[in-house]
Image (spheres, grey):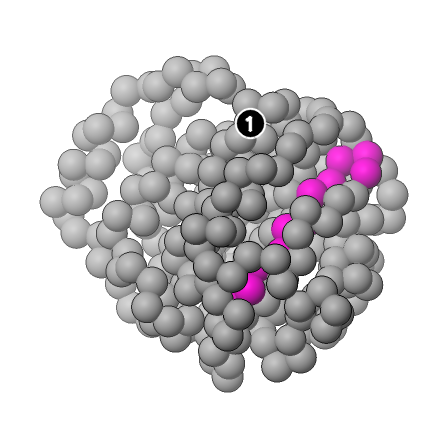
Amino acid sequence: SHFPHTGKTGLSKRTFLRTWKSFQKPRPTDTGKTELSKRTFLTARKTFQKSRPTGSSELDIVFVLDKSGSIGPSNFVLEKTFVQNLIEFFPISPAKTRVAVVTYSSWLKLEFNFNKHINNTCLRNGIQKIGYTGGFTSTGSALEYVKNNLLFSPAAGARSEAMKVIYLLTDGKSNRGVKPGIPAGQLKQRQVIIYAMGVTTHIRESELQQIASSKPEDHVFHVMNYAVLNEVTRLLQGDLPKKKSIQDTTVFARRRTG
């Protein structure tokens, strides 16, 4: 993996017991009853870890977000919240981490490129403004767009020396456009790191593994719904160090959980 393990998450036994106790009872959400199970929490505790990218302090991140009809507007809000929480672990600036967002359903949309948002606050606001459309799930076409028009385009703010990472979030399986494994394979040949994050039970696991970087157990993250995904992120956010520089801390998913 390009993100080597660098030690414990710092999640203390006291913190674990407190957070586990607070989430023992199911909570109502937009997707129905959900519970952050002990298994999910323990796995997440292992999977979200401090890491240090090697070879570069520059990071170009693309979030590729599913906004197809099966998600619905309420879950799309949770999807955006997850991204907003995750970016807090990165030092957003023109010199360090730049972020672009592409959304996809039946259509693709470049929400903003790497030049648009120069700090965390600006980026959070930009994510908040992204609208929901519905439609089919054209995952492969979204990755094709990222490959051809974004990650390697200086005009879009991409940097030739930056480490390049894609976080792809989906709640299902692609049903429109090019097969996602094709552009994903081409991206990985160009040293792009891809994390495939599947949410709900409708996921085609083999498709996530084709999209994600190898080893799949290090780059595929699967949870039952968006509410649980955001609970995991929120819990761990309180236990990881605040961002300092790209060498200090980034957060990623290291194995499948459910």
Up-down relation of residue 44 to residue 95 (above or below): above
Could you say which quadrant of the image residue 228 lies in? Answer: top left
Looking at the image, can residue 188 be seen?
no
Which residue is at 81% across, 63% downward?
148
Instruction: Look at the image and say whether residue 57 sits in the magenta stretch.
Output: no
Which residue is at 56% across, 45% downward?
126
Give the extent of the magenta segment. 97-107
User: Which x, y percent locates residue 187?
Assistant: 73, 66
Q: Farthest residue to the right: give it.
A: 177
Q: In this view, does 146 lie to the left or right of 101?
A: right
Which residue is at 46% across, 59% downward?
119
Q: In this view, does 256 lie to the left or right of 206?
A: left
- Residue linked to disc 1: 75
Up-down relation of residue 113 to residue 37 (above or below): below
User: Which x, y percent locates residue 57?
Assistant: 47, 78
Q: How crowded is mark 1: few (under 14 residues within 10 Å), some or many (20 or more)?
A: many
Which residue is at 33% across, 63% downward?
243
Could you say which quadrant of the image residue 166 lies in? Answer: bottom right
Return the residue nearer the eye: 193 or 43. Answer: 193
Q: Which amino acid does label 1 sit on?
A: Asn
Instruction: Say which element carries label 1.
Output: helix
Instruction: Look at the image and say whether residue 102 sits in the magenta stretch.
Output: yes
User: What secondary structure is the stretch in magenta mostly built from?
Assistant: strand
Up-down relation of residue 77 to residue 189 (above or below): above
